[in-house]
Image (cartoon, rainbow, N blue to C red):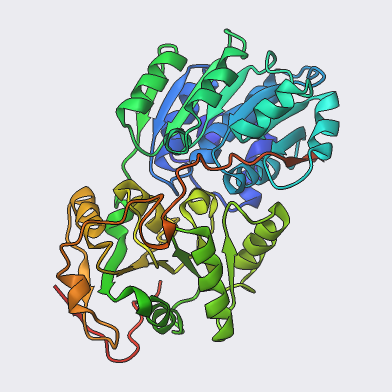
């Protein structure tokens, strides 16, 4: 499909897409939308940044336009499950944009705020409810949401939801849904757990698997600096303090480390904000708003927030800490090189995390270029054979073994209507 008009979408939707500057469908949109307009279940496999939200949002809006009916009190016509607050908020904002020329209502349910606003919205029901699983179950248990009403159900970023331990919550939710429904499952990866979940939820699904012409990993220029752990903040400042770093995301393993890194950058004249599960929803929204409008140049995040960072012009991703799961590296660096752009992903690797780098290189099937000509290079880190830290213990305590928070709160609305690598200090790349 070369145009959205050819997909048969209604005029109010086409007008909104034109307002948003959308010119032609992405591969996942062109592949998925015809199946969804026919009412089929769908398994969509595509990397982040490929337009998955519009791939399910546009057919849902078309269905609402073509089948007008009053939404039941406490109910919804479409339910979208998302793993994080940021992603849920982004999906809600996208629905509002695509539906700006039609009568439409939606609510977003996630954590960090009181439940009053979405409880009020659900009294009358909404066309679309976007929810984190945990908070959704809270409101269902309190009698504020009726899960017997949705005609369409979407599990977005399903692999991330399973990674975060939501499989039991998902199955509890599914047990309350009507048996007659259209179900969509979108995932960036296809481990056996996703295959099993899809088999249990989907009925004779269409399968759309999209590999971009140039994969995210291939479009991103990647490099690693070997440094001692005590010098990481200095090395990060050296990298970030460069005019080519227009907008950057820095990833840490730990929430408290994210706070420390953001504070350090701010003390040295780099506007930065931390975003993670312990931040209030207001603080997270202010950080994301400042990051989008450019008043905050660097966002320091933990993995739980990674997939909700949907900003097209992120020039650089910096891994202050490497992730212990190779797939998380791919998702992290996918915050740059979005919408067809190129980007940089630069990692700081200490001796303890050297083993994780080897795992990452196996996962992406390529060696990451090493930058050695800088003041903080560590031969000990580069040649380390240490076993990696055990998360939940080890240096800095590691990541907690508790299941991450799903976000239990939310808000509701009714709507009617390229840069190169830093080269400070004469750094050069070596293989």
Q: Nearer the viewer, residue 331 or 402?
A: 402
Please report the residue visible at 33 percent of the width from the left and 46 percent of the height from the top.
327
| Label tally | 0
Q: Residue at x 14, y 70 (%)?
A: 383
Question: Quick check: can you spot residue 429?
Answer: yes
Reply above or below: 9 against 232: above
Q: Quadrant of residue 358?
A: bottom left
Decide which of 174, 36 is in the foreground and name it: 174
The image quadrant of residue 142 is: top right
In the image shown, does 250 or 183 lie closer to the viewer?
250
Q: Is residue 296 left or right of residue 143?
A: left
Quarter of the figure that contains the N terminus: top left
Quadrant occupied by the C terminus: bottom left
Instruction: Specify whether 5 is left or right of 367.
Output: right
* Up-down relation of residue 19 to residue 5 (above or below): below
Looking at the image, residue 138 sits to the left or right of residue 158; the answer is right
Q: Position of residue 33 (x, y in %)?
A: 49, 29
**Which percent across, then down, holds residue 37?**
54, 22
Q: From the viewer's perspective, is residue 401 above or below residue 138?
A: below
């Amino acid at each position: 499909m070369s145009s959205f008009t050819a997909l048969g979408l209604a005029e109010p939707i086409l007008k909104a897409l034109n307002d948003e500057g959308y010119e032609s469908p992405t591969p996942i949109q062109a592949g998925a939308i015809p199946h969804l307009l026919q009412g089929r279940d769908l398994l969509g496999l595509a990397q982040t940044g490929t337009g998955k939200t519009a791939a399910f949002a546009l057919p849902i809006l078309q269905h609402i336009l073509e089948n007008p009916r009053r939404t039941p009190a406490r109910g919804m016509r479409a339910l979208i499950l998302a793993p994080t607050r940021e992603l849920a908020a982004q999906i809600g904002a996208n629905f509002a944009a695509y539906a700006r020329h039609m009568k439409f209502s939606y609510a977003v349910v996630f954590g960090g705020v009181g439940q009053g606003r979405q409880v009020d919205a659900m009294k009358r029901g909404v066309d679309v409810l976007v929810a984190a699983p945990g908070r959704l179950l809270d409101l269902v248990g309190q009698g504020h949401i009726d899960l017997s009403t949705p005609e369409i159900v979407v599990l977005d970023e399903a692999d991330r939801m399973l990674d975060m331990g939501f499989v039991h919550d998902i199955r509890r939710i599914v047990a309350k849904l009507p048996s007659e429904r259209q179900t969509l499952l979108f995932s960036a990866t296809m481990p056996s757990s996703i295959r099993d979940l899809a088999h249990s939820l989907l009925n004779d699904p269409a399968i759309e698997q999209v590999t971009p012409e140039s994969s995210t990993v291939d479009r991103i220029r990647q490099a690693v600096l070997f440094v001692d752990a005590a010098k990481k903040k200095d090395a990060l400042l050296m990298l970030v303090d460069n005019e080519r770093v227009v907008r950057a995301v820095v990833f840490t393993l730990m929430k408290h480390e994210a706070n420390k890194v953001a504070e350090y950058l701010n003390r040295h004249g780099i506007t930065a904000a931390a975003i993670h599960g312990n931040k209030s929803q207001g603080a997270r929204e202010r950080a994301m708003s400042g990051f989008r409008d450019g008043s905050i140049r660097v966002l320091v995040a933990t993995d739980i927030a990674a997939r909700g960072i949907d900003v097209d012009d992120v020039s650089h991703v910096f891994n202050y800490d490497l992730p212990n799961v190779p797939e998380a590296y791919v998702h992290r660096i996918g915050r740059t090189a979005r919408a067809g752009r190129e980007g940089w992903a630069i990692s700081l690797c200490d001796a303890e995390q050297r083993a994780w780098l080897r795992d990452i290189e196996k996962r992406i099937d390529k060696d990451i270029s090493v930058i050695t000509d800088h003041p903080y290079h560590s031969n000990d880190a580069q040649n380390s054979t240490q076993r990696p830290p055990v998360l939940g213990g080890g240096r800095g305590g590691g990541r907690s073994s508790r299941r991450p928070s799903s976000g239990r709160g939310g808000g509701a609305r009714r709507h009617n209507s390229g840069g190169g690598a830093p080269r400070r200090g004469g750094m050069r790349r070596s293989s």
